[in-house]
Image (tube, rainbow, N blue to C red):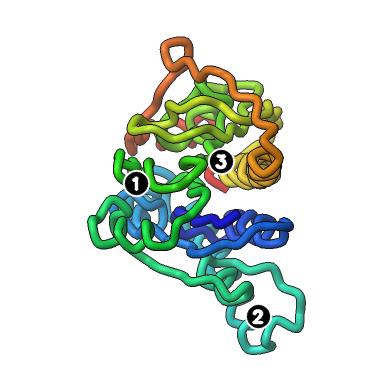
C-alpha cells in the first residue's frame, strides 16, 4: 500500500507515529508533507506567550530545543545511538522518504504531483488546513485523519486544551475519513482516554497522539485486510471548538491549568 502523510511539524510524537507506519509490512510511504501555514502551532509562538506567559512558554521552548539537539546528535552519529527521530525531516531521512514543506496541499501544482504517484491512502496527523475535493479524491482508499478527541465531541482546534478547560474526565483519539468539513467524516476507529488529575496540556497532547498513532496503525491494517467497521460521525450530537482566545488561556492558567 502506497501512503502519503500530510501533517505539521512536531518534535515529539508525530515522527514516532510515522516511524510506526514505516515499519508496517506491505507499506511504502511515498512522501511526508509538512504544512507550514499560519495555522501551524509552530508559527503561533506569540499567541502562546500572551496566553500562558513567558515562563510556561520558555519551558516548552526548552523541551523543543532539547528535541532539536537530539536530532543533531542523531545526524552526527549517523543514527548509531538509536535516538527516536524528533522532526519530520529526521524521520524522512532515516527511512529514505521524500520530504516536502509547503503552504497549501490544495495547490494545483502539488495536486498534479500527488496524482502522478497514484497513492492508495493519504494520512493526516492534524494537518492545519482543510482538504478540498480535488485532494480528497486522489487516493484509492481516501484520506483519513487522526483527531485527538472522542468525536463527535470536541471537533475542531486544540481539543486537548478545550477538554482541560472544561474539566472533562475523559477525551479520546479518533481516526476518521476526511471530507470537505472539519473532523466530519465517518469514524473508522476510536478509543476513550482518561484525563489524569494532574494533566497538563502538553502531557495530554503526548498521550492522545501516542495512543492515536497506534490507532492509526490498526486502521491501516484494517484497510489492508478489508476489515473496516465504519460508524457514523454525528456532528449534531457533538461539539465544535475553534482557536481559544488569549483571555481563555489566561483564565485556564489562573484556575491551575498548565501548558507544561
Depth check, mark 1 against mark 3: the one in front is: 1
Q: Secondary structure at mark 3?
A: helix
Label 1 sits on residue: 135
User: Which mark is drawn over residue 201?
Assistant: 3
Disc 2 element: helix
**Above or below: residue 194 compared with residue 37:** above
Residue that carries the numbered disc 2 in the rendered image: 74
Mark positioned earlier in the residue sequence (1 or 3): 1
Q: Is residue 22 left or right of residue 30?
A: right
Towards the viewer: 233 or 112: 112
Say which mark, if any, is on residue 54. Answer: none
Q: Residue at x 54, y 71 (%)?
A: 97
Q: Is 25 on the left-hand or right-hand side of 88?
A: right
Question: Label 2 crowding class (10 Å Cα cut-off): few <14, some 14-19, many 20+?
Answer: many
Find the distance from the CA under tag 3 to the CA under tag 2: 28 Å
Q: Position of residue 92 (x, y in %)?
A: 55, 71
Marks 2 and 1, how far apart in space? 35 Å
Amino acid at each position: 500500500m502506497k501512503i502519503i502523510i500530510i501533517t505539521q511539524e512536531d518534535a515529539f510524537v508525530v515522527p514516532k507515529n510515522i516511524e510506526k507506519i514505516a515499519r508496517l509490512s506491505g507499506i511504502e510511504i511515498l512522501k511526508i508533507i509538512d504544512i507550514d501555514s499560519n495555522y501551524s502551532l509552530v508559527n503561533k509562538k506569540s499567541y502562546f506567550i500572551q496566553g500562558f506567559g513567558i515562563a510556561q512558554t520558555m519551558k516548552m521552548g526548552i523541551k523543543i530545543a532539547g528535541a532539536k539537539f537530539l536530532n543533531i546528535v542523531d545526524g552526527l552519529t549517523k543514527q548509531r545511538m538509536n535516538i527516536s527521530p524528533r522532526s519530520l525531516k529526521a524521520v524522512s531521512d532515516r527511512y529514505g522518504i521524500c520530504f516536502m514543506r509547503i503552504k497549501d496541499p490544495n495547490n494545483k501544482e502539488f495536486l498534479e504531483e500527488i496524482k502522478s504517484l497514484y497513492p492508495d491512502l493519504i494520512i493526516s496527523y492534524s494537518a492545519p488546513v482543510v482538504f478540498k475535493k480535488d485532494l480528497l479524491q486522489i487516493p484509492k482508499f481516501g484520506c483519513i485523519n487522526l483527531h485527538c478527541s472522542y468525536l463527535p465531541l470536541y471537533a475542531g482546534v486544540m481539543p486537548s486544551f478545550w477538554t482541560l478547560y472544561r474539566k472533562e474526565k475523559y477525551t479520546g483519539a479518533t481516526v476518521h475519513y476526511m471530507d470537505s468539513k472539519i473532523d466530519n467524516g465517518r469514524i473508522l476507529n476510536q478509543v476513550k482516554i482518561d484525563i489524569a488529575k494532574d494533566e497538563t496540556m502538553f502531557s495530554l497532547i503526548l498521550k492522545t497522539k501516542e495512543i492515536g498513532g497506534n490507532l492509526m496503525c490498526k486502521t491501516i491494517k484494517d484497510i489492508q485486510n478489508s476489515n473496516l467497521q465504519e460508524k457514523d460521525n454525528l456532528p449534531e450530537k457533538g461539539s465544535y471548538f475553534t482557536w481559544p482566545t488569549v483571555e481563555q488561556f489566561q483564565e485556564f492558567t489562573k484556575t491551575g491549568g498548565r501548558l507544561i
